[in-house]
Image (spheres, rainbow, N blue to C red):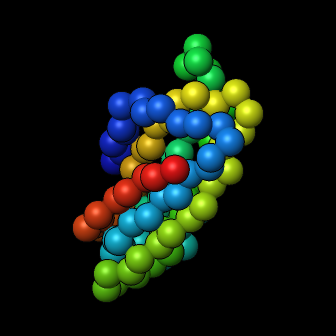
Amino acid sequence: NVSASSPPFMVTAERGLQVSLKYRTTVPGSRSDYGAWLRLEMRDSRGNVIRAVPIICPSAPTWRELIQQIETPPGATQATLQIRLQSSGGTFDIQYLNISE
């Protein structure tokens, strides 16, 4: 298993988030507990997770763009993003990753 996590960043509950990335991966059959995926955790002001959103990256041997709109739940003031290559082996390359409100 390989994972990396961002430091917490501020979010505005009523605005929502857009996650966009360009990636490639040799891992087939990714899901929220296996393969190439991202985990966006939204937290309250005390740092408690109030919503976790998996962003699955389907197999793509060439560069692929993925954009996902995510609703920010009431009470969310911060978020973190984890990049995961879990229980699968293979490669997971990210050319760019952007999170915006």
Residue at the bottom extreme? 62
Picture quadrant where residue 73 is located: top right
Instruction: Note whether 19 is above or below 64 in the view shown.
Output: above
x and y, in percent, of residue 8 in the image? 42, 30
Give the side of residue 66 with respect to residue 6, left or right.
right
Residue 78: image x %, image y %?
52, 30
* Nearer-the-camera pick, 46 or 88: 46
Who's the residue at 70% across and 27% down the image? Answer: 75
Residue 57 pos. (x, y %): 48, 68
86 relative to 45 in the view: left or right? left
Of the pair 36 and 1, the residue shown nearer to us: 36
**What's the residue at 50%, 69% (across, down)?**
67
- Report whether residue 90 is seen: no
Q: How many marks?
A: 0
Please state if 89 lies on the left or on the right of 11 as rendered. left
Q: Position of residue 26 (x, y in %)?
A: 35, 76
Q: Is 32 located above or below residue 60 in the figure?
A: above
